[in-house]
Image (spheres, rainbow, N blue to C red):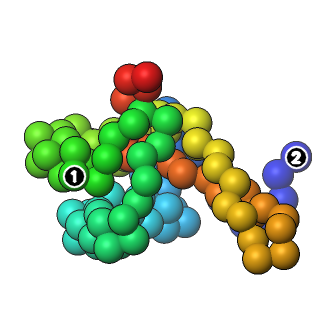
Protein backbone atom coordinates (compact mmCIF):
# COMPACT_ATOMS: atom_id res chain seq x y z
CA UNK A 1 0.00 0.00 0.00
CA UNK A 2 1.34 3.43 -0.95
CA UNK A 3 1.42 6.21 1.58
CA UNK A 4 -0.01 9.63 0.81
CA UNK A 5 2.20 11.86 -1.27
CA UNK A 6 4.12 9.01 -2.91
CA UNK A 7 5.51 10.13 -6.24
CA UNK A 8 4.97 7.80 -9.19
CA UNK A 9 8.04 5.80 -10.19
CA UNK A 10 9.30 6.11 -13.75
CA UNK A 11 12.24 4.47 -15.44
CA UNK A 12 14.56 6.53 -17.61
CA UNK A 13 15.96 3.25 -18.92
CA UNK A 14 12.59 2.74 -20.60
CA UNK A 15 12.32 6.28 -21.93
CA UNK A 16 9.81 7.42 -19.32
CA UNK A 17 10.97 10.97 -18.73
CA UNK A 18 7.67 12.71 -17.93
CA UNK A 19 7.87 12.99 -14.16
CA UNK A 20 6.50 15.29 -11.52
CA UNK A 21 9.66 15.34 -9.43
CA UNK A 22 11.99 17.30 -11.73
CA UNK A 23 13.98 14.36 -13.10
CA UNK A 24 13.11 15.12 -16.72
CA UNK A 25 14.41 18.66 -16.16
CA UNK A 26 17.62 17.21 -14.69
CA UNK A 27 18.07 14.83 -17.64
CA UNK A 28 17.66 17.77 -20.03
CA UNK A 29 20.32 19.71 -18.12
CA UNK A 30 22.72 16.74 -18.19
CA UNK A 31 22.16 16.24 -21.94
CA UNK A 32 22.37 19.94 -22.81
CA UNK A 33 25.02 20.99 -25.31
CA UNK A 34 26.53 23.45 -22.82
CA UNK A 35 26.94 20.72 -20.16
CA UNK A 36 28.36 18.22 -22.64
CA UNK A 37 30.75 20.86 -24.03
CA UNK A 38 31.90 21.67 -20.50
CA UNK A 39 32.47 17.98 -19.78
CA UNK A 40 34.52 17.62 -22.97
CA UNK A 41 36.64 20.67 -22.08
CA UNK A 42 37.34 19.23 -18.61
CA UNK A 43 38.40 15.86 -20.05
CA UNK A 44 40.63 17.59 -22.63
CA UNK A 45 42.20 19.89 -20.00
CA UNK A 46 42.84 16.87 -17.76
CA UNK A 47 44.45 15.02 -20.69
CA UNK A 48 42.04 12.17 -20.03
CA UNK A 49 43.17 8.64 -20.82
CA UNK A 50 41.15 6.28 -23.03
CA UNK A 51 38.62 3.94 -21.45
CA UNK A 52 38.01 0.31 -22.49
CA UNK A 53 37.09 1.53 -25.99
CA UNK A 54 40.60 2.92 -26.58
CA UNK A 55 39.26 6.29 -27.81
CA UNK A 56 41.75 9.12 -27.20
CA UNK A 57 40.76 12.71 -26.38
CA UNK A 58 41.77 13.74 -29.92
CA UNK A 59 39.53 11.04 -31.42
CA UNK A 60 36.76 12.03 -29.03
CA UNK A 61 36.27 15.47 -30.57
CA UNK A 62 35.72 14.09 -34.08
CA UNK A 63 33.42 11.38 -32.69
CA UNK A 64 31.30 13.93 -30.82
CA UNK A 65 31.02 16.20 -33.87
CA UNK A 66 29.62 13.29 -35.90
CA UNK A 67 27.49 11.67 -33.19
CA UNK A 68 26.35 14.43 -30.80
CA UNK A 69 22.67 14.36 -31.80
CA UNK A 70 22.42 10.59 -31.37
CA UNK A 71 24.27 10.73 -28.05
CA UNK A 72 21.99 13.49 -26.71
CA UNK A 73 18.90 11.59 -27.84
CA UNK A 74 20.10 8.38 -26.16
CA UNK A 75 20.71 10.21 -22.89
CA UNK A 76 17.28 11.85 -23.00
CA UNK A 77 15.41 8.63 -23.83
CA UNK A 78 17.33 6.46 -21.39
CA UNK A 79 18.74 4.20 -24.12
CA UNK A 80 22.37 5.23 -23.49
CA UNK A 81 24.36 2.14 -22.48
CA UNK A 82 27.68 2.97 -20.79
CA UNK A 83 30.54 0.51 -21.14
CA UNK A 84 32.48 -0.94 -18.20
CA UNK A 85 35.00 1.33 -16.53
CA UNK A 86 38.70 0.63 -17.14
CA UNK A 87 40.48 0.14 -13.82
CA UNK A 88 44.00 1.42 -13.28
CA UNK A 89 46.12 1.67 -10.15
CA UNK A 90 48.03 4.88 -9.44
CA UNK A 91 51.11 4.57 -7.20
CA UNK A 92 51.03 6.64 -3.99
CA UNK A 93 54.10 8.09 -2.24
CA UNK A 94 53.79 5.56 0.59
CA UNK A 95 54.09 2.64 -1.85
CA UNK A 96 50.40 1.74 -1.84
CA UNK A 97 48.19 2.20 -4.88
CA UNK A 98 45.06 4.23 -5.47
CA UNK A 99 42.40 2.67 -7.69
CA UNK A 100 41.10 4.86 -10.51
CA UNK A 101 38.22 4.24 -12.92
CA UNK A 102 38.50 5.53 -16.50
CA UNK A 103 35.07 5.67 -18.17
CA UNK A 104 34.25 5.70 -21.87
CA UNK A 105 32.14 8.34 -23.54
CA UNK A 106 30.08 5.93 -25.51
CA UNK A 107 29.34 2.25 -25.97
CA UNK A 108 32.09 1.69 -28.55
CA UNK A 109 33.54 -1.81 -28.71
CA UNK A 110 37.19 -2.15 -27.64
CA UNK A 111 39.68 -2.09 -30.52
CA UNK A 112 42.42 -4.13 -28.84
Q: Residue at x 31, y 47 (%)?
A: 56
Q: Quadrant of residue 110?
A: top left
Task: Residue under label 1, please give it.
Answer: 58
Give left or right: position of 71 versus 19. Answer: left
Check whether the beta carbons of the residues at disc 1 and disc 2 lie within 8 A of each other: no
Q: Residue at x 38, y 23 (%)?
A: 111
Mark 1 lies on a secondary structure that is: helix
Distance from label 1 to label 2 (Cα)?
Answer: 53 Å
Q: Nearer the viewer, residue 16 or 79?
A: 79
Query: Where residue 86 sits in the image (x, y, percent)?
Result: 58, 42
Q: Quadrant of residue 3?
A: bottom right
Name the disc covering residue 1, or none: 2
Q: Residue at x 42, y 33 (%)?
A: 53
Q: Is residue 79 visible?
A: no
Q: Quadrant of residue 77?
A: top left
Query: Where residue 24 sits in the image (x, y, percent)?
Result: 42, 59
Q: Depth-wise, is mark 1 or mark 2 nearer the camera? A: 1
Q: Residue at x 36, y 65 (%)?
A: 47
Q: Is residue 59 visible?
A: yes
Query: Where residue 99 sits in the image (x, y, percent)?
Result: 73, 57
Q: Residue furthest bottom?
A: 93
Amino acid sequence: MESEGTVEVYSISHGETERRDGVSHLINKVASRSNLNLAYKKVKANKGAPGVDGMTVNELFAYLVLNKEELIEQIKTGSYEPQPVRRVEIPKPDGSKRKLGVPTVRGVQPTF
